[in-house]
Image: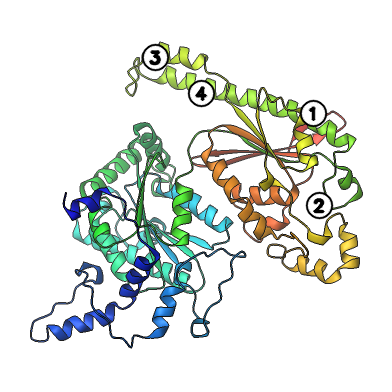
Amino acid sequence: MSTDRRRKTLPVVKTEHDIEEIEHARLHEPIKEELIKEENINEEHKEEPLLSKKTHWLQLSPDVDETLLLRTRHSLGLDVPGAVHTIVPHKLKNERQLDSKLAIIMVGLPARGKSYLVKKLRRYLNWLQYETKIFNVGNTRREHESSHTEQNAEFFDPDNREMKRIRDKLAMEVLEHLMCWLKEGGRVAIHDATNSTLSRRKLLIDRLVMEPEIKVLMLESVCTDKNMLERNFRLKLSGPDYKNKDPLEALADFRSRVMNYERAYEPIGDWEEENDIQYCKLINVGKKVIAYNISGYLPGQCLFYLMNFNLVERQIFLTRHGESTDNVLGRIGGDAPLSSLGRKYSKALSRFVKQCRGEFAQELVDRKKEESRNSPETSPETGIPRKKLIAKTNSLPPSSFTVWTSMLKRSTETGLAFDPDECDIKHIRFLNEINSGYCEGLTYEDIQETYPEEFYARQANKLYYRYPGMGGESYIDVIHRLQSMIIELERMTQSCLIITHRVVMRILLGYLLDWTQTEMPHMMVPIHTVYEIRPNPYGTELRKWKYIEKTDSFEEF
């Protein structure tokens, strides 16, 4: 088997030394070009885009700029806001690490779920405190629409050179805005467009390679599920391109647009690998994932997240534990048991969640029946007759249900009313309340009186403030502690209930509801309140209930 063929079939594994050499060579591209020019001084030399040239390994001068070497070495490794502090050499004190800037280039045909992916990824990275922003080429195109011809399917005809020139110009304009934003302090920028031809991607890469402080990750979304594609097509009719237009004409125009894209479509592959560009290809929203040359902490975090979510409909309930004896006294932290009201809430919570689960299961069954009735006599996907599909739907077993609590008494005792025969119950240390250090067991009035400097420092910056003393934590510490819980929530297909504490509730809801980092530490999450989250491909549904002690029941608000 030849070396080239083996390279196509085996994973590429790079050591830290290999990565440093590649970054070193990339940073010194101008030096290599000068050497090549000197060797070919008597030959005509035609200037080409940076990545269209064949890579040559050259022996560099021994007196290479030491600053460049230092920058290369310090571009590798962990980059976790609030949890990792890198000691930077004096020569680089005014420069950011290379690894801290990432441009994600989206690739894929229309209606393949790109916008869904980028919104999820933006939400996750912002939650981890990497400032992330989406730069959508379609929005820029619509802003320019008034000054150009009507942008129907003909605008996307690959044979129309003038329209192609306009589309490429818009893509490059958005890329310039993206790079400016990164240079002004952003961390991750997403270029949201089809970028479905090799010529377009070369344009983007040839510009990005001039900015060595920005790493590049290409992310392609592929969809082969016909049912999902049809849903996505119809969803596009409610988008800004087809607002106030006849639905039948709009659908026909969009199908024509997709056909134009398909004629010119060139998926990610050989060219990206030949130029060592890292990429990730997701097929059917993560059912299959192909990754190449992933290096660096941020690209690795993106890949890990994208490999762990699904589109299954489910319920995610969140609530704080029932009232504890420390809640009655106003104390924070500690490991107090439930009060009598807390125990009453526990039993009411079990009844209420069971009722909601039953209603949700019936809703799913009714929907499947309706879909079966509206389907052909025989399913085109499975070949199963419609009557058998309806019978199968009627006999669906109740979905499994998971209950997560923290390992603190007030949380585990709230979960005691749930039957282990009906639910998968887990006590998880990651869900414990924030550790208040030597402020554990105090009231906020006690802290203000005894440790006034700590009290006002926390008021000034709750997100980054860390409680003093052994084990004291900040909101940022708890966010990184909960990272594995978020990944599991995205991965799991069954519904669940999370019984936890105020700070953890804020952080989990901050992710699920896309709260900003300034909103999240201050959001009200009252005790004896239940939040129900329903993730779906088109957004997140939220319902809220509060417990009414007088009637021992829940009321939606």
* Marking on residue 386: 3
For disc 4, the marked residue is 367
Near-viewer residue (471 or 304) = 471
- Crowd class of label 4 (few under 14; some 14 to 19; many from 20; radius 10 Å): few
For disc 1, the marked residue is 347
C-alpha distance separating marks 4 and 3: 15 Å
Helix, strand or loop status at disc 3: helix
- Crowd class of label 1 (few under 14; some 14 to 19; many from 20; radius 10 Å): some
For disc 2, the marked residue is 333
Which comes before the other along the chain, label 4 or label 3?
4
What amino acid type is highlighted by mark number 1? Answer: Lys
Helix, strand or loop status at disc 2: loop
C-alpha distance separating marks 4 and 2: 45 Å
Near-viewer residue (375 or 326) = 326
Give residue 109's position: percent from left, percent from top.
Answer: 31, 47
Task: Name the side, left or right, on which 329 lies relative to 295.
Answer: right
Which comes before the other along the chain, label 1 or label 4?
1
C-alpha distance separating marks 2 and 3: 57 Å
Tell me where residue 26 sits by quadrant: bottom left
